[in-house]
Image (spheres, rainbow, N blue to C red):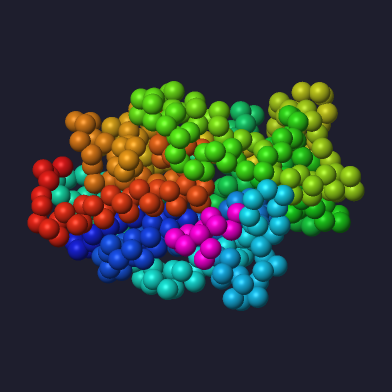
Amino acid sequence: MTETNTDTLVTIVGGGVHGVHLAVRLLQADLIDVCELQILDPTGLLESFRRKCRQCGMVEFRSPFVHHVGTDPFSLRDFARERGREDELRSTTVGAERPTASLFFDHAEWLCDQYGIESTLLDARATDIKNNQGNVEIETTQGCISSQWCLLAVGHGRSFTYPEWARELVSTEPVTHVWEPTFDPNTIDETSTVGIVGGGITAAQLATMLTQPGRDIVLFARSPFRVETLEASTDWMHFSGITEKLHSRPPASRAREELVAEARYDGTMPPYVFRRLQRALKQEQIELERSEITVATEAGGTVVTTCRDGSAFCLDKLVCATGFGSQYDNELFRHLRRESTLQTGYRGAPVLDDDTLRWMRQDGTPSRIAVSGVAAQQVLGPFARNVIGARRAGELIAGLLESELKMKQRGVSRPEI
């Protein structure tokens, strides 16, 4: 492969919320110039997250307005006030107001324009990463990049969960997952009968978004609905004290993973989503099926489902809103586990330094690769994947780079790693 860039100081793999926040933080702190930064993402800045919001009908965020891709916590609120968009800050019974998705993305685009971040974007996907002495070589679909530092800001990728009965049908037209890149709710016919599998926020938002006269919606939710304002206790938002419980356990261990899983309120929905769902159920816009699907069969462009209680449905479309798979199972992480000298632990979790998020090598030395996002949850806790997790990761990684770059400017050298 040809080498695309040999002068890159920092390469960020992933142009989502985490990648954009890292870029904003590093540029705002004057740690790097925009010409020294490269962001890799084949879909564009924030486009994957924007698509997911459209796919599930998320029109407002669960988290408060202080959680955004900038560094000043009140930047988004001020952005809204200056443009007369205060009505897009939605009230909540707990904590600060929440932004609409439109306001969040407009504010993010404004920040990207301010710092010229679009100019750093390379339409490419990372396929391999090698940590060498003094640099990182990143193989991409557009060539090889040599960079002093690599920041991994990738999500689950295409690792999401299908029920057992759906796995043989996922390649057929009637059955899909809400996070499949090809799923577009706008292409569903107005008179279709649509089944949605799941009982959390994504299933509820999708079901209420799709309701309209002439269309039948069946929500398959086997468990009682659980309502929680946020994805975990607010204690975890402070990233101190309670996170010491994580750090007292071995890095990348089963004990850490289980503690995070226990702390997350997975499968829940916030009160405002639950109220919308209740209204739709009361008005009979949505039919609720509490029994679990046991068999699904394609039949002439439709899918026939049979439930454990014996009920059956003939559906034009069946959408699984059943969550993500392992956060360590996207294509890049699988490759790194097989081919690299980076250290991994339970279920492929990266072994990270708790103070800097640097990925440790098998010989116990820190690499020039740092991790932000869901793969850093064994260090940051259950909010690692969220916007506030991006902000905390940004603080740690910016602190790391500031220390390293100052040492380099003073001519102080550390043993090459």
Q: Looking at the magenta stretch, what is its main secondary structure?
A: loop
Q: Is residue 258 left or right of residue 2?
A: right
User: Residue 69: within the magenta?
Assistant: yes
Q: Which residues are magenta?
A: 64-75
Furthest residue in direction front, as rendered: 241
User: In front here: 53 or 266?
Assistant: 266
Is residue 197 in view? no
Q: Is residue 262 above or below residue 201?
A: above
Residue 45 visible in the shown view:
yes
Residue 231: in magenta span: no
**Residue 187 locus on image (x, y percent):** 69, 58
The residue that appears at 76% across and 31% down in the rendered structure is 224
Q: Quadrant of the N terminus?
A: bottom left
**Frontmost residue, 214 versus 82:** 82
Placement of 253 over or under 284, stated as above or below: above
Q: Which residue appears at 50% of the width and 69% of the height? A: 109
Q: Residue at x 81, y 23 (%)?
A: 309
Instruction: Measuring from the top left, give residue 232's x and y in whole percent.
Output: 58, 38
In the rendered image, residue 377, in percent from the top left (x then y), is placed at 44, 38
Figure quadrant of residue 202: top right
Q: Quadrant of the C terminus?
A: top left
Q: Residue furthest bottom?
A: 83
